[in-house]
Image (tube, grey):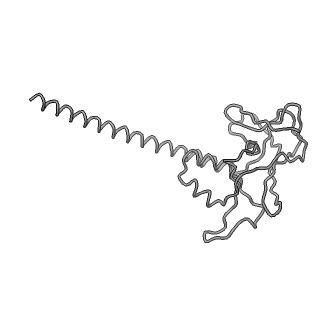
Amino acid sequence: NWGEQVSEQGGVYGLFVRKGAVIEKGTVIGEYVGDLVFEGDLQRNTSNFGPDSVANLLYNFPLSASQQWIRKEEDGDRQLIIDASKARGYVPMVNDYWGFSSQEPRLQNSYFEEVVVDGFPHVMLVAMVDIYEEQEILADYGREYWDTMQLFATRLREHKQLLSLALEAQASSLQESHQAALRELEESHQEELR
């Protein structure tokens, strides 16, 4: 058994093959597990786009293989998504082979495969080559993932700016009320002296 080894390198977590193990080409490494939700419901749940809610978007996997899971509504088709933000599986720890700031080129060595089992959609991570001990398991998350990352960065900047403005306004308000209280105390003290 190759086991899973979640490891942190430079602030980024990833999935690695255990020492002494090999994952052979074609092996199902694991399933991308999480809650099945419709995209519209997920968007409503993250509409405030605070840092935590947007970060959770990074663990969503849109399903495309099974059209039976997409329902028509007034607003059109709604995509079914696996939301792994609260799941305890190890497959969502797999990094995209493009990485965040890779100095050296990294090669994709696994891929996601959608399958329908007993009428329910599943996403499996499959080794596309032999993956050797202590190598990181890397997949292609696709353009949508990086679009979400860009959205996350933009919303986080906006959130920080709004928070900064709110804190400045609160500090200004506190300063004004503090100054008003000091004036009242001073006036009260002046009256007592008369």
Closest to the observer: 142 or 93? 93
Query: In which quadrant of the rendered view does residue 122 lie?
Result: bottom right
Is residue 92 shown left or right of residue 130?
left
Is residue 129 shown left or right of residue 165?
right
Q: Residue at x 89, y 39 (%)?
A: 1
Q: Quadrant of the C terminus?
A: top left
Closest to the observer: 70 or 87? 87
Spot occupied by residue 140 in the image (x, y as percentages of width and height):
76, 47
Q: Is residue 40 above or below residue 93?
A: below
Q: Residue at x 81, y 54 (%)?
A: 113
Q: How many marks?
A: 0
Spot occupied by residue 86 in the image (x, y as percentages of width and height):
67, 47
Query: In which quadrant of the rendered view does residue 80 lie?
Result: bottom right
- Which residue, as the protein is rendered here, is positioned at the far top? 193
Is residue 47 shown left or right of residue 33?
left
Spot occupied by residue 81 in the image (x, y as percentages of width and height):
70, 57
- Which residue, as the protein is rendered here, is positioned at the far left? 194
- Which residue, as the protein is rendered here, is positioned at the far front? 192
Spot occupied by residue 133 in the image (x, y as percentages of width and height):
86, 33
Q: Is residue 185 above or below residue 146?
A: above
Q: Residue at x 86, y 48 (%)?
A: 28
Closest to the observer: 184 or 47? 184
